[in-house]
Image: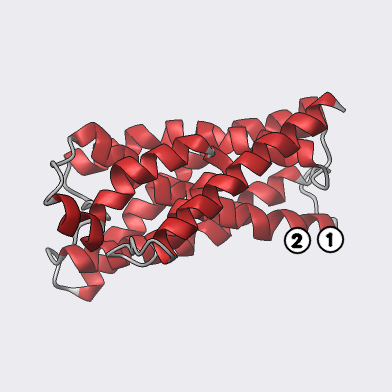
Amino acid sequence: MWLTVLAWSITGIGLLCAVMILIDIYVGGYRQPMKSWEAVWPITAIYAGPLALIAYYRWGRPATSKWRQQHGTPPQFGLNTTAAVETIPGGAASFVGHLIAVPIVVATGVTIAGKGVWPMILLIAAFALPLLIAFEYRSLTQAGQIRSAGLRLRAALKISVLAIIAFDMGMGVVMLLVAFVLGYPPTTIAFWFVMWGGMLLGFMTAYPMVRWLLQRGITEPAEAS
C-alpha cells in the first residue's frame, strides 16, 4: 500500500510538472525553436518531475525567441550542460517506447526464454530508435552544417543507435530487476514507478556517450536556432 501511494504521488507530481511546462509553452508563449522540444520537455517531466521543470526553466525557456526578446542572448552552454540537454530527447523517445511496447507485450503474452521482459526491452528500443533518428536528423538539418541529406541521415542514425544502446544499459538493468527480483506486474503503478527510476538511470548511462559524441563533433546542440 505504501509503495502504491508513493508511486501515485510521484507520478502525480510528474504530471503536474508536465502540465506546468505545457502551459508555459502554449499559454505563456514560450514556443521552442525546434517544435519537437515542445513534446520532449513535458514528456521528460512525467518521469523526472521537478528535475525536468528546473531543466526546462534553466535551459529550455532561454532557447525561445520570447525569452531572448525579454532578456537578450543567453550565455553559451559548456560541454557538460550541452551534453545533458542533448541526452534528454533519448529519454523522451524511450518513454514513448515504453508506452507502446509494454501494452503490446502484456496484450499478446509474447515471451523470450519464458520472460516478457526480453521482448519489452527489444520493442522499446525498436520504437524509440526511429523517434530519436527523426529528432537528430531535424536537429542536424537545423544546425545547417551538414548539407547532404544522406550524410545527415547517417549521422543521425549513428548518434541515435549509440545513444539508445547507452540508455538501455541503465534502463535495462532496472527492467531486469523488476522482472527477476521485484516481480511487479506491468499493469501496476509500482511497475511504472520503478520504470521512472530506470529512465533516470538510463539518462546517467547515456550522458557519457552523448558527451563523447559532442567532443568528437559528431552531433550538434539540438536547441541551436
Give the farthest residue toward the bottom: 149
Q: In which quarter of the image is residue 179?
A: top right
Residue 104 badge: 2
Observer-nearest residue: 124 or 200? 200
- Cα separation between marks 2 and 1: 5 Å
**Would you name the residue on which mark 1 appears?**
107
* Relative to 72, residue 184 above or below: above
Q: Quadrant of residue 68?
A: bottom left
What x and y, as percent, mark residue 21?
46, 53
Q: Which residue is drawn at 64% across and 31% down?
A: 174
Q: Quadrant of the N terminus?
A: top right
What x and y, as percent, mark residue 221?
23, 51
What x and y, as percent, mark residue 32?
32, 62
Tell me, yes or no, whether the two marked residues, 2 and 1, touch with CB atoms within 8 Å.
yes
The amino acid type found where label 2 is placed reads Ile
The amino acid type found where label 1 is placed reads Ala
Can residue 210 be seen at all in this image of the molecule? no
Can residue 213 be seen at all in this image of the molecule? yes
Residue 41 badge: none
Q: Residue at x 21, y 62 (%)?
A: 65
Q: How many marks?
A: 2
Disc 1 residue crowd, few under 14, some 14–19, many 20+, Cα 10 Å: few
Q: Residue at x 43, y 66 (%)?
A: 26
What x and y, as percent, mark residue 12?
67, 43
Of helix, strand and loop, which one carries label 1? helix
- In the image, taking residue 113 as reference, residue 148 lies left or right, namely left
Of helix, strand and loop, which one carries label 2? helix
Observer-nearest residue: 5 or 120? 5
